[in-house]
Image (cartoon, rainbow, N blue to C red):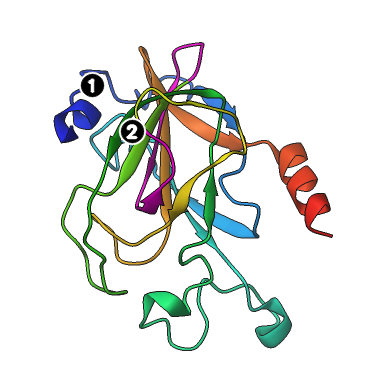
Amino acid sequence: MLTFFLSFSLALADPDQPIRQVVMHPVFADDYMCSEHWVGQLPYPSDALGQDCMIVGGIEERGFASPYRSDGLANEDWYGWQRPVLAPADGKVLGVRNNPATNKPGTLGSPPATMVLIERSDGVKIVVAHLGTVNVATDDVVKAGQQIGTVGNNGYGRAPHIHIGAFDAEGPLQLRWDLRALAGLRATED
């Protein structure tokens, strides 16, 4: 199954061409922050222009957002640990890859990560990786905002987070978040 996720022979983003974008449903209902992969940073279409996203908290205690409580040396210290991960789009699950290992924060694990590959009706494929548990199976149809798993810490990663990447037949796509959908998720919590 790993080769299924890495076998896409697509061109990476051309640094001399405009970057194409895609809008996704938020992957968390919680407050979160993402760090983006720049053009050429990673060699796979599901990584190129992708993002690593972490749930944050602690604003009341510290005055600013942090990804973990205390010293962050245990997975349970991280605000995102085992929190729900939402489907970023409507689509069909093309594949699921499980990695039962759990990394210790600060220690880089071995690939591959636990991941789900979803395809939208327009052909855009989305990889959601580093899941702790997976709530979907190959050939399931998912709706944007449906829980597809929980945050884990496995594969080539050092902390509880989710990697998300999107691509189509022409190459990787830069992610943008549907902030109206995020506002709707936040409103249902109150």
Give left or right: position of 119 versus 101: right
Can see residue 114? yes
The picture places residue 142, in percent across and down from the top left corner, at 53, 28
* Amino acid type, callout 2: Ser
- Are dots 2 and 1 in contact, CB under 8 Å? yes
In the image, residue 153 sits, relative to residue 20, either above or below, namely: below
In the image, is residue 128 part of the stretch drawn in magenta?
A: yes
Q: Give me the disc on residue 46.
A: 2
Residue at image mark 1 = 8
Magenta stretch: give its range: 120-137
Location of the C terminus by quadrant is bottom right
* Amino acid type, callout 1: Phe
The picture places residue 129, in percent across and down from the top left corner, at 36, 45
Q: Quadrant of residue 153?
A: bottom left
Q: Give me the disc on residue 105.
A: none
The picture places residue 101, in percent across and down from the top left corner, at 21, 61
As rendered, which of 55 and 44 lies closer to the eye?
Answer: 55
Location of the N terminus by quadrant is top left
Give left or right: position of 87 versus 1: right
Q: Residue at x 54, y 25 (%)?
A: 21
As rendered, which of 147 and 2 lies closer to the eye?
Answer: 147
